[in-house]
Image (cartoon, rainbow, N blue to C red):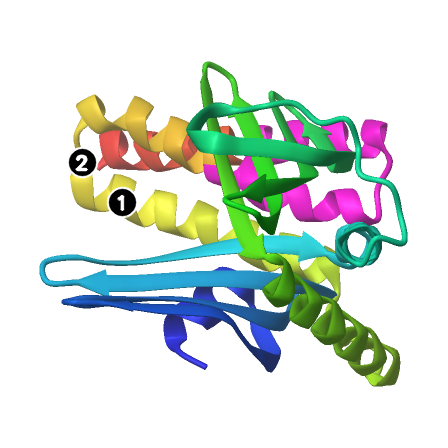
Amino acid sequence: MSVIDRLFVGRVIRDLGILERRSFTVGRFTKRLLLAEQRGVPQFVIKTSGWSLFSFGVRYRTLSLETAYKLRECIDESDQIARGEAPRGDGWKERFGEQVIRDFGHIERQASLGSRQSRRVVLIERQGKLFLEMRSSSWFLLAGSWDRDVLALEDALQLREWIDEGEQIVRDLPPTAYDPRKAVLRNCSLIVLIGGALEILARSGNLVAWIAVSMLILCLAQCQISRQYADERAYVNRVVALAVLFTITVTAIRVALLVR
């Protein structure tokens, strides 16, 4: 796998295959499924990449194992509806000639400090053909986003097979050597050292506030790892401790510079 995959999704365990591929006059669109391990946790990743004459882009959509298994249940029921073994829902008309055949509801809901993310799955019919649509929405403070992934039903059936294959691979994986405590300590120590180096190089009071805020945000982001093994109170205590540590470090560096 590429360095970009390693950076955004962690260690790629298996490239399960291509879900969808479309070619244009000048360009190509590809959607594939990866099984990856990030921070010691295996997960499925839908990687969407495309290029045209003057642009190129890659998007990663991560699915926890639990979410992927719920999605598989939705695909099972969609297959039954397509074969006439399960009743179609009443549905409702949407724009562009789409009709919702079945709303399966939310398959994932996550909430953390100042943010929320949710995913729901619906089965739609467009021009007599069935599609499985995963609608994702998220917001953070004053910003929000909405997006969707659409798969033809035959592609969704292939996705179901690969989820089954990924489940078997996960069962056979050896125990992970990842330690979240060490990761928090290592990453936050690097953040503090980088912040101190920037402070020394800048030697300007105008950048102190910006550097302090930026490094604190990074500390908070890295400390999210600790939620895998800590309760809410311990998590808050770690955040406060890291903020105090960084403040003391920056203050000490400023005092040393002034003394010189």
Return the residue at label 1: 198
Residue drawn at point x = 58 percent, y = 28 percent: 244
Residue drawn at point x = 77 percent, y = 79 percent: 165
Furthest-top residue in this view: 142
* Tag nearer the camera, 2 or 1: 1
Furthest-left residue in this view: 54
Residue drawn at point x = 60 percent, y = 54 percent: 62
x, y percent for residue 69: 82, 57
x, y percent for residue 228: 79, 48
Against 209, is 89 above or below? below
Say whether residue 249 is visible.
no
- Upstream in sequence: badge 2 or badge 1: 1
- Answer whether residue 237 is magenta in the image: yes
What segment carries the magenta color? 218-244
Count numbered badges in the picture: 2
x, y percent for residue 200: 25, 44
Return the residue at label 2: 203
Quadrant, the N terminus? bottom left
Residue drawn at point x = 60 percent, y = 20 percent: 114
Quadrant of the image occupied by residue 167: bottom right
